Image: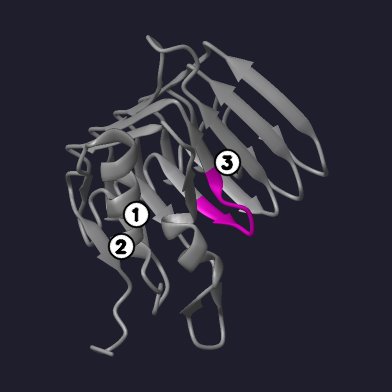
């Protein structure tokens, strides 16, 4: 699907709940959330699905406000896959929610391209007066929550400005980078490729 504003394919808002399993989100376009846009306390579970070749200003999946997204890879031989998506910020995932995106099971973010920041994941939750990262970044680096025995693999993602793999658009994200690396190594023994970017703070 195509939309001028938000949600090229699916929008959940105002406490709505949704579930998708073994679904392919392909070739959708929108300014925000080419394939999916979640906002205003919506909750969504996506299981063993593929998000392919979508185009947006921000996110093939865009998660905003107090929305909740669970990405469940499903059975052992299944996974969630984000691949070949294009956007300005967060080609695969754009997160600006007070709840982290939860990753369960196996998830791969491959070959996505951001013309600005965050080829794989673009995370922004901040105090607009000083651009300080929300404290949630300390507990959930890049607003991602990896459950026990989960697997997160980022490969060959690109961003023209910063953070081919992951980008935090705020300053002082606490220990976000180190904690995320620890979680990725602990859970999946995979290292993200394509780079990690943090918003500049004039060297502070």
Residue topped by disc 2: 177
Secondary structure category for the residue under label 3: loop
Answer left or right for 18 relative to 86.
right
Answer left or right for 201 relative to 122.
left
Query: Where 107 falls versus 68 (above or below)?
Result: above
Residue located at (26% from left, 48% from top): 165
The CA span between labels 2 and 3 is 34 Å
Q: Quadrant of the N terminus?
A: top right
Q: Dots 2 and 3: beta carbons under 8 Å?
A: no
- How crowded pointer 1 is (Cα within 10 Å; few <14, some 14-19, many 20+) is rated as many
Residue topped by disc 3: 4
Q: Position of residue 74 (x, y in %)?
A: 50, 16
Q: Quadrant of the C terminus?
A: bottom left
- How crowded pointer 2 is (Cα within 10 Å; few <14, some 14-19, many 20+) is rated as some
Q: Is residue 153 magenta?
A: no
Mark nearest the camera among 2 and 3 is 2
Answer left or right for 118 relative to 173.
left
Q: Which mark is residue 180?
A: 1
Q: Dots 1 and 2: beta carbons under 8 Å?
A: yes
> Where on the picture, by quarter, is residue 51?
top left
Tell me which colouring the rendered structure shows.
one colour
Residue located at (82% from left, 44% from top): 14
Q: Position of residue 150 (x, y in %)?
A: 41, 32
Q: Nearer the viewer, residue 31 or 197?
A: 197
- How crowded pointer 3 is (Cα within 10 Å; few <14, some 14-19, many 20+) is rated as few
Q: Position of residue 145 (x, y in %)?
A: 49, 47
The CA span between labels 3 and 1 is 34 Å
Q: Which residues are magenta?
A: 95-101
Secondary structure category for the residue under label 2: helix
Secondary structure category for the residue under label 1: helix
> Where on the picture, by quarter, is residue 93?
top left
Which sits earlier in the primary sequence, circle 3 or circle 1? Answer: 3
């Amino acid at each position: 699907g195509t939309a001028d504003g938000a949600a090229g394919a699916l929008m959940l808002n105002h406490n709505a709940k949704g579930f998708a399993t073994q679904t392919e989100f392909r070739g959708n376009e929108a300014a925000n959330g080419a394939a999916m846009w979640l906002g205003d306390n919506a909750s969504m579970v996506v299981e063993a699905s593929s998000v392919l070749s979508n185009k947006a200003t921000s996110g093939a999946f865009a998660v905003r406000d107090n929305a909740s997204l669970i990405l469940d890879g499903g059975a052992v031989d299944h996974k969630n896959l984000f691949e070949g998506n294009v956007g300005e910020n967060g080609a695969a995932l754009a997160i600006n929610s007070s709840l982290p995106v939860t990753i369960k099971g196996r998830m791969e973010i491959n070959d996505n391209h951001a013309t600005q920041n965050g080829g794989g994941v673009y995370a922004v939750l901040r105090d607009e007066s000083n651009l300080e990262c929300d404290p949630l970044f300390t507990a959930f680096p890049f607003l991602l929550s990896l459950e026990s025995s989960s697997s997160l693999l980022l490969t060959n993602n690109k961003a023209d400005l910063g953070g081919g793999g992951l980008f935090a658009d705020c300053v002082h994200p606490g220990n976000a980078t180190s904690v995320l690396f620890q979680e990725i190594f602990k859970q999946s023994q995979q290292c993200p490729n394509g780079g990690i970017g943090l918003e500049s703070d004039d060297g502070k």
